[in-house]
Image (cartoon, helix red, strand yellow):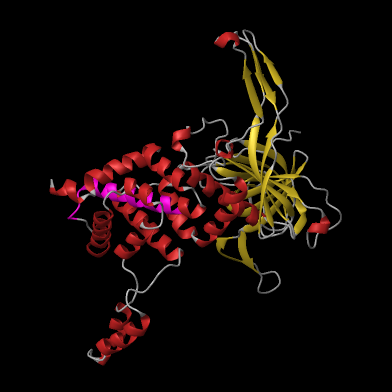
């Protein structure tokens, strides 16, 4: 049996017996299939009872509308235990009263599968370790086990050279009792003899290993860790990155509560549908398309900062990364998302200062309300808020990153803040943006997104030198700066 993790971009099939945990004596043969585009489907020769029934009196069965769903289905296939979660019947074919008696058939769809363990639920703390591989992780790690040597006496290559393997030291960071480790796994040398050539090959895989010191993890925890790593690499590379594989280690009984007997640590593979399925053999991004790697921000520094940011600024991060994972086809949707991300990010920084001191605002509000008829006071009270405006928030965000880097991206902060506020307010309050051309709206989306990203990179601790390199050298941000110069500067508009 292969020890390689099951890649989420590869199809799989497992034929075996399947049963409900509460009724292990009723086992149904069937085949579980996984397809990257379609997910998990269990085809049964036989069926689980999916009708919703009651028996008000002995001998009387009432069938109600709707179908049953099953939180967990267990199976045994290809010499491995399998657990399916989030299961519901897609189709059922019964043969009651048929002229020729044949087996029932049923198709069940599952959201998640564990290949290698029987678990009672997605929240059961049963795993000692989570291992995650996502796209671009090796590039971001800026390390590899391979070293190459090309012989070039007198400055001229003579056709000889070598590739050697040198183990890479594991980098680790601990965050609130959880240890994150950046590790490498490589294959042994393999020589593929072909008819016209011989190919020598080794594979180096970078992955993140997550271990809790004080307690075991659940499947829900593992998928959360995968999302945490996926979002970090997506921010660092400024592109949608997919999850390639997730592998768990089943903990022994001393690390889990309620387990039965000693369970040796063994590999358990996770099959589910992340936001993007990673392709392990796809070509990596080029250096100029990556914001930062572990060379610019070491792993032991970035992980604690990212864990704090991901929890504290998750809504803003989700919104701005959503523009990479699922960009809308219409600029209006992207405008609301980008500006919303900026507003939410400012709130997440917890730097709101009321425009009017509270000691002055409260008596002012009460004095104004005293002039309003009683029946309208509550409505007006809700409108009299002492919060920063959107323009205030945009100015504040522009002041946080490195000034030189921000000025390259946004040469005229005042006009960007005013035009962005006008566009958002027109769209939100009037349902249209009659005062903006399409190209200006697109520039507003890109510039606002860039400001949010620059703030996130600054919050991670990226140096001012690297921030300046990014806005000068990254193709997307260079294009954004040109758009800002064309559409969001007063000098251009007046010329």
Q: Is residue 94 visible?
A: no
Above or below, comparing residue 236 to residue 307 in the picture: above
Residue 195, horizontal then vertical, whole percent: 64, 8
The reply to whether the magenta stretch includes residue 446 is yes
Query: Can you name the residue that lies furthest to the left here?
Result: 495
For image coordinates 26% across by 50% down, the residue present is: 441
Write down the quadrant of residue 381 in the picture.
Answer: bottom left
Q: Which residues are magenta?
A: 434-456
| 171 with respect to 310 (left or right) | right
Above or below, comparing residue 259 to residue 140 in the picture: below
Q: What quarter of the picture does the N terminus occupy?
A: top right
Residue 298, horizontal then vertical, whole percent: 59, 45
Q: What quarter of the picture does the C terminus occupy?
A: top left
In front of the other: 354 or 249: 354
Above or below, comparing residue 283 to residue 141 in the picture: above
In front of the other: 431 or 230: 230
| 67 with respect to 420 (left or right) | right
Query: Can you name the residue that lies furthest to the right here?
Result: 261
Residue 105, horizontal then vertical, whole percent: 63, 46
What kind of secondary structure does the magenta stretch mostly adopt? helix
The reply to whether the magenta stretch includes residue 473 is no
Q: Is residue 187 visible?
A: yes
């Amino acid at each position: 049996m292969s020890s390689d993790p099951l890649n989420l971009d590869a199809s799989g099939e497992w034929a075996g017996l399947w049963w409900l945990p509460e009724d292990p004596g009723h086992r149904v043969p069937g085949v579980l299939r996984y397809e990257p585009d379609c997910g998990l489907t269990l085809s049964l020769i036989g069926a689980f009872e999916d009708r919703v029934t009651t028996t008000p009196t002995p001998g009387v069965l009432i069938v109600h509308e709707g179908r049953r769903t099953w939180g967990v289905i267990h199976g045994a296939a290809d010499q491995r235990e399998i657990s399916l979660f989030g299961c519901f019947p897609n189709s059922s074919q019964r043969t009651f009263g048929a002229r020729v008696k044949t087996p029932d058939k049923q198709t069940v769809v599952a959201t998640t599968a564990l290949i290698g363990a029987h678990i009672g639920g997605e929240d059961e703390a049963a795993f000692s370790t989570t291992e995650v591989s996502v796209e671009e992780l090796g590039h971001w790690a800026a390390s590899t086990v391979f070293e190459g040597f090309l012989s070039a006496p007198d400055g001229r290559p003579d056709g000889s050279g070598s590739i050697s393997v040198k183990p890479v030291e594991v980098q680790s960071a601990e965050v609130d009792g959880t240890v994150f480790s950046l590790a490498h796994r490589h294959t042994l040398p393999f020589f593929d003899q072909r008819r016209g050539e011989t190919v020598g090959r080794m594979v180096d895989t970078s992955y993140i290993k997550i271990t809790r010191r004080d307690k075991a993890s659940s499947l829900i925890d593992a998928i959360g860790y995968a999302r945490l790593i996926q979002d970090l690499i997506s921010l660092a590379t400024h592109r949608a990155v997919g999850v390639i594989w997730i592998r768990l280690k089943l903990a022994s009984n001393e690390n889990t509560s309620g387990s039965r007997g000693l369970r040796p640590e063994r590999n358990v593979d996770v099959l589910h549908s992340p936001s993007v399925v990673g392709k392990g053999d796809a070509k990596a991004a080029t250096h100029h398309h990556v914001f930062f790697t572990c060379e610019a921000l070491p792993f032991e520094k970035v992980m604690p900062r990212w864990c704090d940011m991901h929890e504290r600024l998750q809504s803003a991060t989700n919104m701005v990364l959503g523009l990479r994972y699922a960009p809308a086809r219409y600029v209006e949707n992207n405008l609301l998302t980008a500006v919303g991300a900026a507003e939410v990010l400012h709130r997440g920084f917890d730097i709101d200062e009321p425009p009017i001191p509270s000691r002055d605002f409260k008596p002012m509000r009460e004095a104004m309300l005293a002039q309003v008829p009683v029946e309208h006071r509550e409505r007006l009270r809700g409108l009299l808020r002492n919060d920063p405006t959107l323009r205030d928030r945009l100015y504040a965000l522009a002041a946080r990153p490195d000034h030189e880097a921000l000025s390259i991206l946004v040469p005229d902060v005042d006009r960007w803040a005013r035009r962005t506020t006008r566009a958002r307010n027109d769209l939100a309050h009037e349902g249209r943006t009659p005062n903006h051309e399409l190209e200006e709206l697109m520039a507003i989306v890109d510039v606002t997104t860039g400001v949010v990203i620059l703030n996130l990179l600054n919050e991670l601790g990226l140096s001012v030198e690297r921030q300046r390199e990014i806005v000068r050298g990254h193709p997307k941000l260079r294009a954004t700066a040109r758009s800002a110069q064309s559409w969001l500067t007063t000098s251009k508009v007046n010329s």
